[in-house]
Image (tube, helix red, strand yellow):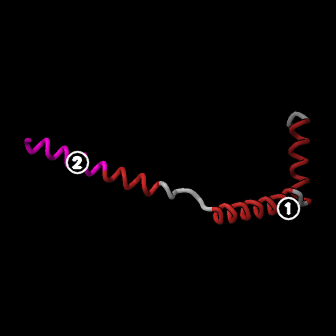
Amino acid sequence: MNTAVRAVEAVRGRMRALVRRVRTARGDAGMVTSEYAVGIIAAVAFAAVLYKVVTSGPVQAALQDIVKRALDGGA
């Protein structure tokens, strides 16, 4: 076996080992239940704040004005 073939085989072996390590590490890439719970709590809190902002007087009036102008043809 010449040196070029040995070098190629060595590189292939290293690549296989690297791929195995990456696949093994990727198995733990998801969120656990506690992370989902924290994410849901954050999303609900954001939704509550957004609801309060959108239903406030000035924002509601501005949104109604936008819809009214859109329905009147932009005049």
Query: Is 39 above or below relative to 5?
Result: below
Looking at the rendered image, the quarter that the N terminus falls into is top left
Kind of residue sitting beneath label 2? Val
Of residues 9 and 38, the one nearer the viewer is 9
Image coords of residue 23 (percent x, y): 42, 52
Looking at the rendered image, the quarter that the C terminus falls into is top right
Asked if residue 15 is among those painted magenta in the image, a careful observer would answer yes
Where are the magenta residues, as a range? 1-16
Q: In the image, which disc is placed on residue 62?
A: none
Asked if residue 9 is among those painted magenta in the image, a careful observer would answer yes
Marks 1 and 2, Cα distance to the nearest angstrom? 60 Å
Q: Secondary structure at mark 2?
A: helix
Q: Residue at x 85, y 37 (%)?
A: 74
In the rendered view, does 35 fall on the left or right side of 44?
left
Image coords of residue 64 (percent x, y): 91, 48
Q: Residue at x 37, y 55 (%)?
A: 21
Of residues 61 and 50, the one nearer the viewer is 50
Q: Given contact means CB atoms under 8 Å apart, are the residues at marks 1 and 2 in contact?
A: no
Q: Residue at x 61, y 62 (%)?
A: 32
Q: Taken as a whole, is the magenta stretch helix, strand or loop?
A: helix
Query: For mark 2, does the 10 Å Cα neighbourhood hold few (<14), some (14 to 19), or many (20 or more) residues?
Result: few
Q: Secondary structure at mark 1?
A: helix
The quarter of the picture where residue 40 lies is: bottom right
Kind of residue sitting beneath label 1? Lys
Of residues 55 and 27, the one nearer the viewer is 27
Image coords of residue 66 (percent x, y): 86, 45
Query: Is 41 above or below relative to 9?
Result: below
Q: In the image, which disc is placed on residue 52?
A: 1
Query: Is 52 above or below relative to 62?
Result: below
Q: Which residue is mark 2?
A: 11
Image coords of residue 52 (percent x, y): 85, 62
In the current view of this chain or complex, which residue is farthest to the left? 2
